[in-house]
Amino acid sequence: MGFPPLSSARLLGPAFVLVAGAAGATWWYLDQRDRESEVLAAFEFLHRNVYEALAETDEQRLYEALARSFHGRELERQYREFHAGLLHRRDEQVEVQLDRLEFLGLDVALSGSDRAEVTASWEVGGRLRHRGHVHLRLLRHRARSTLQFVPPEGWRLVACEVLQGQDFTLSEAERERGTAPPVAATVAPEPRPGP
């Protein structure tokens, strides 16, 4: 019997899910491989939510957006950091637009039935709009995160440690000039042979 997609399941705990459908409801037990897949899917979803929170410009909505991914002390810590970034973006009149988020590597270690640690590396690309200019960014990150199953919300990030990373802030020179250094070298297309 195959495991149904998470989109059709309501997570009731780390070891069991209740799948509701037109024909009724069914309990499914998750083996370790299924639990690892569940945790990784939850991590990717929570992680994308974190980047979506960058679009929030209101403090209350920012907190609510972060609460969809974080819990406890980590929520409070992340809110302080994101709020400081929000105030900085307001002062500098910077708008952040994310264009892509790609996971390069994900490793999970289960710890009991309701906790897991995920070590992830990813690339995020976006644009900073500042003083009529657009500054492109392509950043790589690596972090270790602890997920905890928190009823009734589900999986939440309860600890995060950045192992390697960059941020989207403008350098002092970019703020003064209103221009950004090139993100990557541009290669001219090969000339086409004539007729």
Image (cartoon, rainbow, N blue to C red):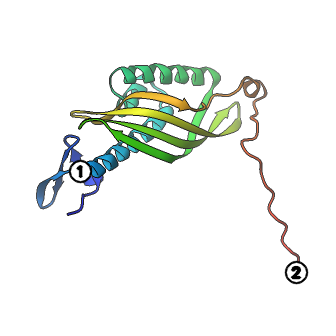
Residue drawn at the location 71% of the way across and 26% of the way down: 171
| Farthest residue, direction right | 194
Q: Of marks 1 and 2, which one's residue comes earlier in the chain?
A: 1
Residue, disc 2: 195
In the figure, is residue 134 to the left or right of 58? Answer: right
Residue, disc 1: 31
In the figure, is residue 190 to the left or right of 47? Answer: right
Q: Is residue 28 above or below residue 158?
A: below
Residue drawn at the location 23% of the way across and 41% of the way down: 14
Q: Quadrant of the N terminus?
A: bottom left
Residue drawn at the location 20% of the way across and 44% of the way down: 15
Who is closer to the viewer here, 194 or 105? 105
Q: Residue 27: percent from the left, percent from the top?
A: 14, 52
Q: Residue 3: percent from the left, percent from the top?
A: 24, 58
Q: Residues within 10 Å of mark 1 (few under 14, many from 20)?
A: few
Element assignment for label 1 = loop
In the figure, is residue 148 to the left or right of 159? Answer: left
Who is closer to the viewer here, 193 or 148? 148
Q: CA distance from mark 1 to mark 2?
A: 63 Å
Amino acid type of the residue tagged 1 in the rendering: Asp
Element assignment for label 2 = loop
Who is closer to the viewer here, 163 or 192? 163
Q: Residue 111: percent from the left, percent from the top?
A: 30, 35
